[in-house]
Image (cartoon, grey):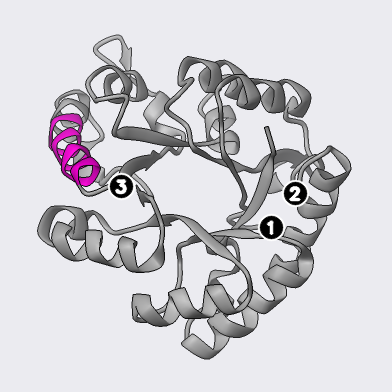
Amino acid sequence: MSKITGAQLYTIRDFVKTPEEIDQSLRKIKEIGYTTIQASGMGPIPPEELAAIARSHGLQIVLTHMPYERFVNDLDGLIRDHHTLGCGLAGIGGLPAEYRNADGYVAFAAKFNAIAKELAQNGLKFSYHNHHFEFEKHNGKLGIETLLENTDPESFLFTLDTYWVQAGGADPSSWIRKMKGRIEAIHLKDMAIIDEKTIMAEVLEGNLEWPDIFQACEEADVKWYLVERDAGPTDAFESLSISYRNLKKAGFE
């Protein structure tokens, strides 16, 4: 199966504030070599215009991150926007703070399981992006386990973030395998130590066990491999370039 690399636009969020910046930045993304993107962290732009800009640069939008409020208060509009974008995965970037407790995880799972089923009825899938706090135990159970066990595997998917799984004290490869069939898109992000501090690093530049992560991704039928770096000392576009070159050498497209 082809391993298609994409860019998570949150990485370059400081350079996609206006439609003009989005156009210029997507041109740079394409020049690096990426063919897919995740729409996230951008300034306001009509979905029709974003779709046209992406098409003009030969980029496919495969995932979004949408605010919690849109899922809850404007699901019909969110669905229309995703159809306009030609994007089948509607994602949320994180769990709202009020849900980060034992009862909250159960409540969020119930609410978004229903939302995910409505998305599925309209040809879309929901995808939940993790951080590290989902690996805190509540009443003896990890938050991410509650989400996994109380949602429909057909419509409620996960965008597993390799860095944040590791930051949560867990093994990314193990969790990829546990979520087999429920990860269409994954965030590739490395972890390194500089001056005794943990930092986010370009893919294959840090200490994560990438050969096993890549093998687990193949076993779990991951489709979209999205490169991300939230923060770091390297220029954001150069960061994406370094990761792309490293992945290219590792056999990605």
Q: Position of residue 173 (x, y in %)?
A: 61, 20
Quarter of the view holding residue 112: top left
Q: Amino acid at mark 2?
A: Glu
SS class of the residue under badge 2?
loop
Q: Residue at x 76, y 48 (%)?
A: 253
SS class of the residue under badge 3?
loop
Q: Nearer the viewer, mark 1 or mark 2?
A: 2
Q: Position of residue 38 (x, y in %)?
A: 51, 58
Left or right: residue 65 versus residue 52 is: left
Q: Kindly check if marks 1 and 2 are in contact, taking CB atoms under 8 A apart as contact.
A: yes
Above/below status of 215 relative to 83: above
Give the CA separation, mark 1 to mark 3.
33 Å
Q: Position of residue 16 (x, y in %)?
A: 53, 78
Q: Residue at x 36, y 75 (%)?
A: 47
Magenta segment, which residues?
109-121
Give the CA separation, mark 1 to mark 2.
9 Å
Q: Residue at x 26, y 46 (%)?
A: 96
Left or right: residue 35 versus residue 75 is: right
| Residue sitting at the far top | 140
Q: Amino acid at mark 1?
A: Gly
Above/below status of 194 relative to 44: above
Circle 1 residues within 10 Å: few <14, some 14–19, many ≥20: few
Q: Which mark is residue 232?
A: 1
Q: Which mark is residue 202?
A: 2
Specify whether residue 201 is in view.
yes
Q: Of 119 and 206, which appears nearest the observer?
A: 119
Residue assigned mark 3: 124
Specify whether residue 233 is in view.
no
Q: Amino acid at mark 3?
A: Leu
Q: Residue at x 83, y 38 (%)?
A: 251
